[in-house]
Image: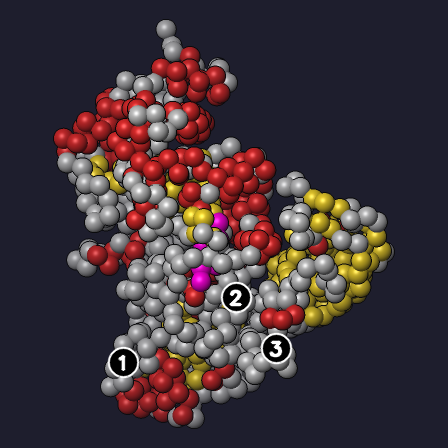
Amino acid sequence: MTSPWRDRALPTAARVEDLLSRMTLEEKAAQLYGVWVGAATDGAGVAPHQHDMTVEHSGEEWDELITRGLGQLTRPFGTAPVDPATGARSLASAQRRIAAAGRFGIPAMAHEECLAGFTAWGATAYPVPLAWGASFDPALVEEMARRIGHDLRSVGVHQGLAPVLDVVRDLRWGRVEETIGEDPYLVGTVGAAYVRGLESAGIVATLKHFAGYASSAGARNLAPVRAGVREFADVTLPPFEHALREGGARSVMAAYTETDGVPASADPGLLTGLLREEWGFDGTVVADYFAVGFLKTLHRVAGTDAEAAHAALAAGIDVELPTVKCYGEPLLEAVRAGEVPEELIDRAVRRVLTQKCDLGLLDEDWTPEPTGPIDLDSAGNRALARRLAEESVVLLANPDGLLPLSPDTRIAVVGPRAADPLAMLGCYSFPSHVGVQHPGVPMGIEIPTLLEALRGELPDAKVTYTEGCDTSGPDRSGFEEAVARAAEADVCVAVLGDRAGLFGRGTSGEGCDALDLQLPGVQGELLDALVATGVPVVLVLLTGRPYALGRWDGRLGAVVQAFFPGEEGGPAVAGVLSGRVNPSGRLPVSVPRAPGGQPWTYLQPPLGLAGEVSNLDPTPLYPFGHGRSYTTFDWEDIGGGTPEFGTDGSYDLSVTVRNTGDRAGAEIVQLYLHDPVARVTRPDVRLVGYQRVSLEPGEAARVSFRFPAALSSFTDRTGRRVVEPGALQLRLAASSTDVRHTAELTLTGPERVLGPDRPLRCETEVRPLG
């Protein structure tokens, strides 16, 4: 007879309660942690990962451990290079072994990183999230995430640790490349699209880092967060609301950081009160790696591993990752001693088992065997990676029309990022994250360099190359040759930027925070030397963050920005240089003018703007939303509804966009809100809507926005989210500063207090015109 918990005909809750009632304390606790493993290269199974921060398990300990069951398998593919098909067989073998060892035959959930593609050997390396933001194309990001999800599913993975929904607050922070940008509306809408794509493929999307991680003091990784209550509510939290309500994410990862003295991993107000009770989230909350133990070792709010486990479990962390430490014997001993209520374990286990049930892992006919062919870097993946890379390239400046380059010109390509395939990849791509530790292993995917791609784009051009300098080192010995090559050319393409890495081993990435925003190493001096030749210089930046460019303002022939554009980034950027691709990316982060002391984002109240009370001007060189094209667009026939509407109403605004140039292109129509007077200070402008519009030469389209009054809401002094009656301005713009039309509006009626079910987006419509 089938046990009730195996019966698919029963409601999930009934199945879970039946199973929970049969489990011992040890079996329940085993569902609340992972073990970090690596897939065997012969397909035999997985073995515990030997890592300096994990608890190491011998084969005998592993055999004993899995008799209780196991909650998670941590990164079987993302730990070491393994052929995907072999890794899938290893994972299936391990799952059979785990199921056979326990009384209930429950497999583990397997999770992987998938920030810019599945972080596995041989998997497509897509552009990083900052490039997603630059595309202003949520639909394309959703398609990418769906492909990533299908690849994860094809090898037996259940959960993806993405997307990152942190809003950039300081451009020096090393993980800027992992974020979608500096505006919460852009981060929320693009992030929700990624979640929809991943979840549509059956993968549990995990939102991170909840919450405040990007607001760390001094831009130092894992530093204290000193954000105020309203900044937290109005900037930090909205992207998570988007991704939960509009994306359907089933998991959240608690942040490492502490805000006002309370670590997120031990904050019941955040992880239970806000997330679950107010927002209604019913999925799982997982710990960032080692974060439960950090409550003792780093935050010092717990004196023992058991106290750390109690604090995290009580706050609402259901699963300890990446491996068992505090949620193992320390927690069990504390429960047996009456120091931790067993009800806390039951609460977390219910959530874990509910998710496993929803994934089919409790079904009697569950099988771990992969179905269908395994190809993690298919032609379809690469085509999509190319398209997203092309849409994300931002043409910052082209004052005299130097770009596109002439097809038969003499080009000197100079710079440390021109001939290195890793110049295209962010910190969480497999080659940069894991592959660098295995120098004898092939990269696993083809990554054309910009130099190779440019030669392919312009076969009749005479292209020379020299490195000039290292990415971050002090050696200037290559300057002389670089200047000589530039002097012989008609145009110099300087390819500068970042090298992604971990914890100081790169110039961008986790733990690679910057002292200031000048180009790394001596790259700025190299650029000075190239400009001094008098030969027109096209600056191409392959970076994980923006860098200060005011030093060269007006001195460069053109400036092209690409944020780690992935394995197809070389051809994408080369296509922009050759003119095959009409650039359409827009800045998701501002580009500063000066490198020091002004790590500025555009969400500034009046005192954050330039003024007479300080000699420092924080105004960026290139503002949020900025980007150029090789064609021109006219904005015509702008119209709106009645300028007065209620605090519970909405306002319609529309514009006709016409391509007046001689080639196809895309315009990004942006809608900003300005609130002239409010009871608390507000950003001077903030994005509340946008629409990407692709048009052939001479073609036009009508772009309409429906702005709900709820999008003008903010958190007042009492902590309520309110819509105030009074004056507002809506600004149709091509960037946060390039305003094409201003609509003066008045909100009428009573003040409204909004709850978590408030409208989150400005609906848009594009209607082609004949």
Look at the image and tell me in which quarter the C terminus lies.
Answer: bottom right
From what the image shows, is residue 562 above or below residue 707? below
User: Can you name the residue that lies furthest to the top here?
Assistant: 1
Determine the CA span between mark 2 and mark 3.
18 Å
| Along the viewing direction, whichever of 260 and 486 lies nearer the viewer | 260
- In primary-sequence order, the first of circles 1 and 2 is 1
Determine the CA span between mark 1 and mark 2.
28 Å
Label 3, residues with CA under 10 Å away: few <14, some 14-19, many ≥20? few
> Is label 3 or label 1 in front?
3
- For the record, the magenta segment spans 211-217
Could you tell me which residue is drawn at 44 percent across and 59 percent down? 216
Label 1, residues with CA under 10 Å away: few <14, some 14-19, many ≥20? few
Residue 430, horizontal then vertical, whole percent: 31, 53
Q: Which residue is mark 2?
A: 589
- Label 3 sits on what residue type? Ala
Colouring mode (rainbow / by chain / secondary structure / one colour) = secondary structure
Q: Which residue is mark 1?
A: 474
Q: Which residue is mark 3?
A: 610
| Along the viewing direction, whichever of 225 and 415 lies nearer the viewer | 225
State the SS at label 3.
loop
- Label 1 sits on what residue type? Pro
- Label 2 sits on what residue type? Val
